[in-house]
Image (cartoon, rainbow, N blue to C red):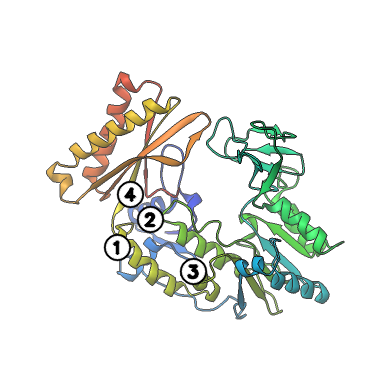
């Protein structure tokens, strides 16, 4: 009689393996089949879900205050460009450092959020500029100081840090910053202060999420530093300060959901402060303090964000105004994969001229490399079909997958289709 999907905006509800379903859409379908009520819960609903509510397809119930009646924490936006101009090259800004010291004086706890683990994003040669790359993926290796290794966060490849640049013998310099590096900076800036780091490198079968959270609560460790694991669902009454170290990481990525995800993450993590009887506050560090997404998140103003985002989606013909079908071809030889992707594009364009499909004004774009073009020694190129998620389109894409698999020219290659893909 009742289905509840909590945090319905989470992209992890979308399966990356066959069958490529979205749990939220399955819940809505099951609810309709069983004549049951489906409840989607979120402080930051997806733009598509809110659009369905605004247009009357869904019912809308607003909860306008926190469960305990506590006010939302005031938020300070710190311009990191100004920090650099004033000589502070640390990832911890002066306003955030002062707030951390004040919290320590009061015996209160703080949460710091940075969605990048490791010590540095990568190493680069100061002489020739080359960057150590993963041999199996088209990504630079991330430097981890704790074990002195370079690691790929996609395929898991690991190798020791070279003493010198393998190309020219020059010195290697750290570029960017991860949670391990922040932990080191905090130990230098706040000597003797306990810092509990929580990311994929510290969480294990022995050190589970629950154990680390219990330590933070019971031992009253002053600072919890982590990735998305600390951004939502936590309720610590002694946490009165939240710091977002780099609000820009998720904002400028190649995905139409970048603004939505950034707004959601910032809103959720800011909401971790001041959940008990003590007043909370938050500090958001960014290089683009004037960005509307960051400003709306700082004000916790979902309505303003939605109005801005829905206008952009309508102009660009993104969901909910059209559906995006990503058709990806993968294989071990880049040239063959690209040629196959071009063939797929031409086939799609021919099929879309059929009357039953042409009515939806479909567009076929690409092929273009995936955001990470090579993963585990397989190259990936994709075409995008902008159209309507109706029966004719689904049947056409199912036929395309079967036809691709039957063609002997495509031996060793795979083709798969994502609908409104999260990445």
The quarter holding residue 36 reads bottom left
Asked whether 403 or 283 is in front, the reply is 283
Percent coordinates x, y for residue 88 in the rendering = 71, 65
Percent coordinates x, y for residue 122 in the rendering = 64, 44
Q: Which quadrant of the rendered structure holds the N terminus?
A: bottom left
- The residue tagged 1 is 315
Badge 3 vs badge 4, beta-carbon distance below 8 Å:
no
The local crowd at label 3, few if under 14, some if 14 to 19, many if 20 or more residues have their Cα within 10 Å, is few
Percent coordinates x, y for residue 321 in the rendering = 29, 59
- The residue tagged 3 is 291
Q: CA distance from mark 3 to mark 4?
A: 26 Å
The mark closer to the camera, 3 or 1, is 3
The residue lying at 46 percent from left, 57 percent from top is 258
Q: CA distance from mark 4 to mark 2?
A: 20 Å
Tell which circle, 4 or 2, labels the residue nearer the N-terminal end. Answer: 2
The mark closer to the camera, 2 or 1, is 1
The local crowd at label 4, few if under 14, some if 14 to 19, many if 20 or more residues have their Cα within 10 Å, is many
Tell which circle, 2 or 1, labels the residue nearer the N-terminal end. Answer: 2
Q: CA distance from mark 2 to mark 3?
A: 34 Å
Tell which circle, 3 or 4, labels the residue nearer the N-terminal end. Answer: 3
415 vs 139, left or right, is left
- The residue tagged 4 is 324
Element type at mark 2: helix
The residue lying at 61 percent from left, 78 percent from top is 74
Q: CA distance from mark 4 to mark 1?
A: 15 Å
- The residue tagged 2 is 28
Element type at mark 1: helix
- On screen, 276 above or below 57? below
């Amino acid at each position: 009689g009742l289905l509840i999907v909590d945090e319905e905006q989470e992209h992890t509800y979308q399966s990356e393996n066959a069958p490529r379903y979205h749990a939220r859409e399955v819940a809505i379908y099951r609810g309709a089949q069983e004549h049951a009520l489906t409840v989607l819960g979120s402080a930051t609903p997806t733009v598509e879900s809110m659009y369905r509510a605004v247009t009357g397809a869904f019912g809308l119930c607003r909860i306008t205050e926190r469960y305990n009646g506590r006010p939302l924490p005031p938020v300070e936006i710190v311009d990191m460009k100004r920090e650099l101009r004033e000589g502070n090259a640390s990832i911890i800004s002066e306003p955030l450092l002062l707030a951390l010291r004040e919290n320590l004086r009061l015996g209160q706890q703080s949460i710091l959020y940075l969605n990048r683990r490791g010590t540095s994003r990568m190493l680069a040669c100061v002489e020739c500029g080359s960057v150590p790359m993963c041999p199996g993926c088209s990504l630079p290796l991330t430097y981890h100081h704790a074990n002195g290794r370079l690691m790929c966060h996609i395929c898991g490849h690991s190798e020791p840090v070279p003493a010198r640049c393998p190309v020219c013998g020059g010195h290697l310099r750290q570029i960017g910053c991860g949670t391990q590096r922040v932990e080191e900076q905090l130990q230098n800036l706040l000597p003797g202060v306990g810092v509990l780091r929580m990311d994929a490198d510290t969480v294990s079968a022995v050190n589970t999420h629950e154990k680390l959270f219990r330590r933070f609560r019971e031992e009253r460790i002053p600072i919890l530093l982590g990735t998305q694991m600390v951004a939502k669902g936590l309720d610590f009454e002694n946490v009165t300060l939240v710091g977002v170290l780099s609000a820009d990481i998720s904002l400028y990525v190649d995905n139409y959901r970048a603004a939505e995800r950034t707004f959601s993450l910032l809103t959720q993590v800011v909401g971790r402060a001041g959940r008990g009887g003590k007043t909370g506050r938050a500090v958001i560090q960014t290089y683009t303090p004037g960005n509307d997404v960051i400003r709306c998140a700082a004000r916790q103003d979902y309505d303003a964000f939605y109005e801005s985002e829905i206008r952009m989606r309508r102009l660009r013909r993104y969901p909910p105004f059209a559906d995006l079908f990503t058709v990806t071809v993968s294989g071990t030889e880049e040239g063959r994969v690209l040629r196959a992707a071009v063939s797929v594009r031409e086939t799609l364009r021919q099929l879309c001229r059929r009357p039953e499909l042409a009515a939806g004004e479909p567009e076929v774009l690409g092929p273009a490399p995936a955001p990470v073009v090579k993963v585990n020694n397989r190259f990936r190129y994709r075409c995008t079909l902008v159209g309507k998620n109706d029966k004719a389109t689904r049947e056409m894409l199912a036929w395309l997958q079967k036809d691709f698999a039957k063609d002997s020219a495509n031996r060793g290659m795979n083709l798969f289709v994502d609908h409104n893909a999260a990445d």
